[in-house]
Amino acid sequence: MKIRIRYFLLVLVIVFIIGYIVGWLWPIHSVMYQLSEEPVDKGVNLSNLIAIFAAFFTLMAVVVALFKDEIVGNFKSVDVTEDLLSSSVEEYLNENQGGGDPTVVKYYNQIFFKNRGNVNALDCELTVESIDFKSRTDLHYKPVSVAKRKVLLGGLERTYIPKDGGKRETDLLEIMVSEEPDGNKKTQLLIANNPVAAKAGTWIVEYCINMSNAAVRHCKFEISWDGVWHDHKNNMQIEIKKI
């Protein structure tokens, strides 16, 4: 877009320079049409008015032909935003307990990417730019190793986000617990599908979503957790927010 506009402006400058030179060599009064003092009838006035409008619309047609994509782009665009499923965690229950009370299999949270534009967001790919962690005793955040940078969006590595409010989701966080042979419980924590140490602290997760018909978009989320597993969601001391 910028290149085409530069060319258009360059052409205007060249035309101006040529016009200036021509006007200097042949003064304007030498080529001026000699006006008559006789009254002009309505037919001539109407003909002149039509000629002016015809010239104007011809110029507009040229401009539209040159910048059609840019003009249409002002009325059709992709507008992707992101939001969390909740400000804490949701629970996934195991209800196959033979009539017993359901138990929590895992806690989770998701990010929803919503397209409020009037054009589908095409060739969407979501990657994890970074994960940083700070414990309660740390002064500064430290980077966490990210083994899996490309994450699924709507269950696919490459997809599209429908226009007019369409959504695609990705997993931000999963907390699970398993029982070891000695009877102790081991807590597992996944952030953006990457296993990290399940301990108290705060994580900063940065995502990047690439789209073929829109600008690259970055977003960050903060996860604060006390590192303790509870069997009831209301007891989980965890807070998640977009920053």
Image (cartoon, grey):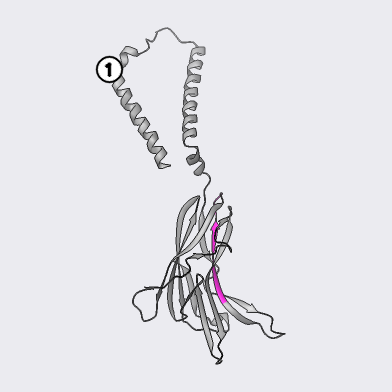
Residue 151 horizontal/vertical position (percent): 52, 65
User: Which residue corresponds to the image point at 44% horizontal and 81% vertical from the top-left?
Assistant: 200
Q: Is residue 133 visible?
A: yes
Query: Secondary structure of the magenta portion, mostly?
Result: strand
User: Which residue corresponds to the image point at 52% horizontal and 12% vertical from the top-left?
Assistant: 43
User: Which residue corresponds to the image point at 45% horizontal and 62% vertical from the top-left?
Assistant: 219
Crowdedness near tag 1: few (<14), some (14–19) or many (≥20) residues, C-alpha within 10 Å: few
Residue 81 sits above or below residue 86 on the image: above
The magenta region covers 107-118
Residue 145 horizontal/vertical position (percent): 42, 72
Indicate left or right for 94 with 80 as reference. right
On-image quarter of the C terminus: bottom left
User: Which residue corresponds to the image point at 61% horizontal and 76% vertical from the top-left?
Assistant: 92
Assign a secondary structure to mark 1: helix
Q: Is residue 74 visible?
A: no
Name the foreground residue: 29 vs 119. 119
Q: Give the residue furthest to the bottom.
A: 182
Residue 131 horizontal/vertical position (percent): 43, 70
Name the foreground residue: 40 vs 218. 218
Check if residue 108 falls in the magenta segment. Answer: yes
Residue 34 horizontal/vertical position (percent): 37, 10
Residue under label 1: 25
The answer to which image quadrant residue 160 occupies is bottom right
On-image quarter of the N terminus: top left
Indicate left or right for 178 with 224 as reference. right
Indicate left or right for 80 with 137 as reference. right
Q: Give the residue furthest to the right.
A: 99
Indicate the amino acid at tag 1: Leu
Name the foreground residue: 166 vs 211. 211
